[in-house]
């Protein structure tokens, strides 16, 4: 019971606060620019050559203001926004008018979550394990070679790395589809579909796992080199505990703990990376939706994506926070 | 300088330095360009690399090589503005929060933390969408600066916190030095390596972010940068049409630039850090 | 009494690479010891004199930057003397815990924080004993814990759930599990309150009596030596400067350093100002020439500055000092 009070409740409060502040930021920061998205749209329409008489323009502005939640005072707008968030009503998408943004999100979100979850878990696990073993055997040559290779991969940004893999494996050696997956309606759940999904997700997943993995590798390697020198590890070695046991149960298991915390802190950036990679491979997730929304000036859609992303990341962080005590007995017991 | 000679012994610094210098040289070369960076149809289109055009020409009728020199120059300008401005903010916030502590510290750090958990990238995109028209080089740099200070402010603050506890702070405070002059004079030498490495990391981040913004069409697409040239290559289906020289150039240049910056940052911060540690140990024994 | 461990002119140094060149820390600088069986043997000295390193060498636990530069460590196993440092690591590991075990300094962090104590015990037994025997030994461990005044349920706990004193006692239980002939205990009572200290010392004493093995008790606390040990050695700057029966050392300390150590002990009724030796021990990386103690020694003369005194017998004691020739003995 004390656990619930001391650990669980603060985390939940934190979750609510973060989501609240995040969405408030989404509300305020764009307004700081002093730009009016409605005027933007009108300007775009007029730039494309359509001429509208003043009455039509005014009506259009009213409608748009309503749809964008820009009616009324700042406070009223703020409340309107919250009302909409709770009803999951982000208004209609502009480029796919009148499809509501929420509907689009519902279709594309699961794909992103799938890619996000899989690639994050894989990159974290692989990066940490390989990094940990490399850290333990830091004198060996394979460890040093790996270090050098990673020194080249680490600084490459998501978009560029994605493009490189795309060129190599979809054009130079056409092993994978260049245009990603296309999701139609009424797809039958058969082997063909599953294979198509795997083929289409492989490159984006690979990009994310490699780029994510190298970061974990470096951090874990450093951590392990320190944990290796801790008293209890030395003692275990002196006492004759088998080396493999020492590596896994004594060194890795302890070094993993701060990495879990680090993962929680990095989730925001990891998620952004997922979106960017989706854009490269035209993977049918929120990244692709974002690309379409931004290039077509669909403000509602972009706002919807942002709000949903905040929710997704905050939830993932919460889940991790709840998972941590299962791994660290020092938190679990007293 | 003896320091430079020692640094050059680290192969990472040497290689990074040479590559970076090479790229900066290319950037300066842009001032000698025979072509206008923005005008299209200046040369025959889609020509593979030849003696007349060492990196070929693109579908817009521009020389890929000379466009590349401009793109490096402009990307670096944006990134430098972003890096330097955000350093100033990060240093101010970090120092004030770390030294003053209390409510001010908590508010500032809460602000920074909030900006971290939120997908900054998306809000950046939203703002950029609204400012679409006025995305000059400088403005892009400033926008990136606005979003780039949070992480480093926190790191600087932790360092200030640990420095604050050290002996010389208490002595200096007792001898009656004013707060700001104390803070700046005493702490800056210790935080400089940290600030320097975060500067380079921030510059690298800005270069990467600029590319994403360009792909999303949120910057002035006629101005050649690493991001915009890549964007045009993709829009014109360079990959599909086999115009590999057009799309590879920004990709390769970006990779070179970022790897060079990363190697410089790692080798310099390693050099500065354990050095200080051992010097301190040496003084004691 | 046959010796159970012999150290012959042991030399082990730490070799460190710094940007300014090589730094050699002579932690064990020519140590010769004869440690008898069935004894509580004390090793005294200030921190930084090399005691912990000496224990590491006795265990055969030499890892860079610690390197073996000379001398031998002999174990008497099954009637034969084995050169511990010349053995292959595998053989040495087999001897650990079965012949010689170790209770490290500050048992705060010697247990894996994310594993139950039971798991740690099993890990240690794994390489020495077969599966079947392990279960039996675990039961034996539980009985062992009971005999030591600890509930066997402790094995189900995590290290952080126990107090410092309890952890120390569990560490002792672990070290004695396989009934080793020699137990090296490095400062087992530091950082414990007086009550816990007593319990730990009592435990060690009981174990020694029951198992009839040797416990090498390393501590800077002379009071503990006076209470528990039968024979002891005094270490200074990497060398043994005095050795003998504890009683003799306390009644007739021969080396000036020993005299200081004993004089600094509090005694009921003695209200005189206690003085410790002036100055501080030398850095093991920059030892003074000649006798390492001479800069602080009130009786130092010319020879002390030039030659290093060897350990020589004076009656039943051994001392490394040129003074004994001048029979300049100061009693308290």
Image: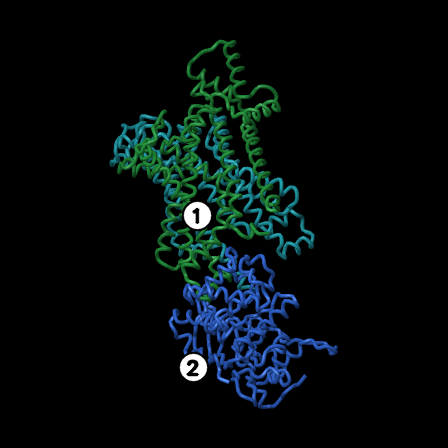
Q: Quadrant of the C terminus of chain C?
A: bottom right
Point out residue A193 in the picture as x, y percentages from the top left corner.
32, 32
Give the CA distance from mark 1 to mark 2: 53 Å
Q: Tell me the residue at 52%/71% (across/down).
A: C52
In-front residue for pair C227/A34: C227
According to the picture, the residue beneath numbered tag 1 turns out to be: A216
Q: Which type of secondary structure does the marked residue at label 1 adopt? A: helix
According to the picture, the residue beneath numbered tag 2 turns out to be: C79
Closer to the camera: disc 1 or disc 2? 2
Residue A32 shows up from this direction: yes
Q: Residues within 10 Å of mark 1 (few under 14, many from 20)?
A: many
In the shown orientation, is residue B104 left or right of residue B259? Answer: right
Q: Tell me the residue at 62%/49% (across/down).
A: B183
Chain letter, colour blue: C
Point out residue A47 in the picture as x, y percentages from the top left corner.
44, 17
Residue C236 shows up from this direction: no
Q: Quadrant of residue B50?
A: top left
User: In the rendered image of this protein, does residue C254 appear above or below residue C54?
Assistant: below
Q: Which type of secondary structure does the marked residue at label 2 adopt? A: loop
In-front residue for pair A167/A134: A134
Tell me, what hue is chain A?
A: green
Q: Chain of mark 1?
A: A
In-front residue for pair A179/C244: C244
Q: Are marks 1 and 2 on the same chain?
A: no
Q: Residues within 10 Å of mark 2 (few under 14, many from 20)?
A: few
Point out residue C285 in the picture as x, y percentages from the top left corner.
51, 71
User: In the rendered image of this protein, does residue C110 appear above or below residue A164?
Assistant: below
Chain letter, colour cyan: B
């Amino acid at each position: 019971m004390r656990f619930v009070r001391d650990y669980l409740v603060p985390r939940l409060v934190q979750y609510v606060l973060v989501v609240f502040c995040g969405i408030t930021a989404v509300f305020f920061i764009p307004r700081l620019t002093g730009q009016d998205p409605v005027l933007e749209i009108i300007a775009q329409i007029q730039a494309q050559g359509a001429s509208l008489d003043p009455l039509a323009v005014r009506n259009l502005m009213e409608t748009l203001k309503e749809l964008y939640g820009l009616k009324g005072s700042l406070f009223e707008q703020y409340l309107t926004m919250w009302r909409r968030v709770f009803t999951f009503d982000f208004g209609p998408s502009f480029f796919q008018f009148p499809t509501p943004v929420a509907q689009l999100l519902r279709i594309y979100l699961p794909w992103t979550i799938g890619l996000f979850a899989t690639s994050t878990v894989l990159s974290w696990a692989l990066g940490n394990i390989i990094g940990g073993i490399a850290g333990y055997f830091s004198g060996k040559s394979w460890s040093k070679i790996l270090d050098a290779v990673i020194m080249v991969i680490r600084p490459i940004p998501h978009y560029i790395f994605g493009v490189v893999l795309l060129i190599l494996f979809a054009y130079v050696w056409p092993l994978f589809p260049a245009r990603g997956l296309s999701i139609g309606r009424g797809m039958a759940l058969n082997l063909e579909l599953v294979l198509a999904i795997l083929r289409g997700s492989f490159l984006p997943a690979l990009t994310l796992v490699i780029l994510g993995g190298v970061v974990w590798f470096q951090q874990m390697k450093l951590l392990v080199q320190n944990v290796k020198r801790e008293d209890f590890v030395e003692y275990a070695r002196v006492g004759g505990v088998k080396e493999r046991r020492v590596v896994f149960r004594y060194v890795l298991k302890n070094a993993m703990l701060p990495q879990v915390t680090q993962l929680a802190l990095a989730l925001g950036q990891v998620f952004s990376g997922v979106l960017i990679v989706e854009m490269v491979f035209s993977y049918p997730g929120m990244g692709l939706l974002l690309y379409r929304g931004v290039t077509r000036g669909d403000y509602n859609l972009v706002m919807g994506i942002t709000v949903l992303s905040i929710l997704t990341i905050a939830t993932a962080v919460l889940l991790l926070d709840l998972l941590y005590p299962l791994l660290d007995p020092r938190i679990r017991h007293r | 300088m003896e320091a430079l000679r020692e640094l050059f012994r680290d192969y990472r610094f040497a290689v990074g330095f040479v590559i970076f210098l090479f790229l900066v040289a290319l950037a300066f070369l842009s001032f000698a360009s025979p072509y206008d960076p923005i005008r299209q149809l200046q040369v025959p289109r889609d020509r593979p690399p030849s003696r007349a055009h060492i990196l070929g020409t693109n579908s817009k009728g521009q020389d890929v090589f000379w466009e590349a020199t401009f793109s490096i120059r402009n990307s670096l300008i944006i990134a430098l503005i972003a890096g330097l401005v955000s350093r100033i903010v990060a240093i101010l916030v970090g120092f004030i929060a770390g030294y003053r502590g209390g409510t001010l510290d908590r508010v500032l750090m809460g602000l920074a933390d909030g900006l971290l958990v939120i997908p900054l990238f998306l809000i950046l995109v939203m703002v950029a969408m609204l400012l679409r028209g006025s995305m000059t080089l400088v403005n892009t740099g400033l926008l990136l600066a606005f979003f780039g200070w949070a992480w480093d402010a926190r790191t600087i603050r932790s360092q200030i916190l640990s420095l604050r506890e050290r002996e010389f702070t208490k002595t200096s405070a007792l001898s009656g030095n004013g707060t700001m002059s104390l803070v700046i004079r005493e702490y800056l030498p210790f935080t400089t390596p940290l600030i320097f490495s975060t500067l380079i990391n921030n510059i690298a981040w800005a270069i990467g972010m600029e590319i994403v913004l360009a792909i999303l069409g949120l910057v002035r697409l006629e101005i050649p940068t690493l991001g915009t040239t890549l964007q045009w290559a993709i829009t014109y289906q360079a990959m599909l049409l086999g115009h590999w020289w057009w799309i590879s150039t920004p990709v390769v240049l970006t990779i070179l630039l970022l790897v060079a910056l990363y190697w410089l940052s790692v080798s310099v911060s390693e050099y500065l850090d354990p050095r200080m540690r051992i010097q301190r140990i040496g003084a004691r024994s | 009494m046959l010796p159970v461990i012999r150290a012959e002119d042991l030399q082990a140094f730490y070799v460190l690479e710094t940007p300014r060149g090589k730094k050699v820390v002579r932690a064990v600088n020519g140590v010769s010891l004869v440690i008898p069986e069935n004894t509580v043997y004390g090793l005294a000295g200030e921190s930084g004199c090399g005691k912990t390193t000496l224990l590491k060498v006795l265990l055969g636990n030499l890892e860079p930057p610690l390197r073996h530069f000379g001398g031998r460590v002999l174990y008497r196993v099954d009637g034969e003397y084995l050169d511990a440092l010349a053995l292959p690591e595998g053989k040495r590991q087999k001897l650990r815990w079965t012949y010689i075990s170790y209770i490290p300094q500050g048992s705060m962090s010697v247990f894996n924080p994310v594993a139950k104590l039971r798991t740690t015990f099993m890990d240690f037994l794994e390489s020495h004993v077969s599966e079947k025997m392990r279960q039996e030994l675990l039961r034996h461990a539980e009985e062992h814990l009971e005999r030591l005044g600890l509930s066997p349920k402790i094995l189900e706990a995590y290290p952080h759930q126990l107090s410092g004193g309890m952890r120390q006692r569990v560490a002792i239980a672990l070290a004695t599990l396989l009934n080793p002939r020699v137990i090296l205990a490095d400062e087992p009572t530091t950082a414990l309150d007086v009550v816990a200290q007593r319990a730990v010392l009592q435990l060690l004493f009981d174990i020694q009596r029951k198992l009839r093995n040797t416990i090498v008790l390393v501590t800077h606390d002379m009071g503990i030596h006076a209470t528990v040990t039968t024979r002891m050695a005094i270490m200074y700057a990497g060398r043994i400067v005095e050795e003998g029966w504890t009683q003799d050392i306390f009644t007739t300390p021969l080396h000036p350093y020993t005299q200081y150590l004993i004089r600094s002990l509090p005694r009921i009724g003695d209200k005189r100002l206690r003085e410790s030796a002036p100055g501080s021990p030398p850095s093991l990386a920059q030892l003074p020439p000649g006798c390492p103690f001479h800069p602080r020694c009130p009786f130092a003369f010319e020879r002390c500055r030039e030659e290093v005194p060897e350990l020589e017998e004076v009656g039943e004691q051994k001392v490394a000092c040129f003074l004994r020739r001048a029979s300049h003995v100061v009693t308290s």
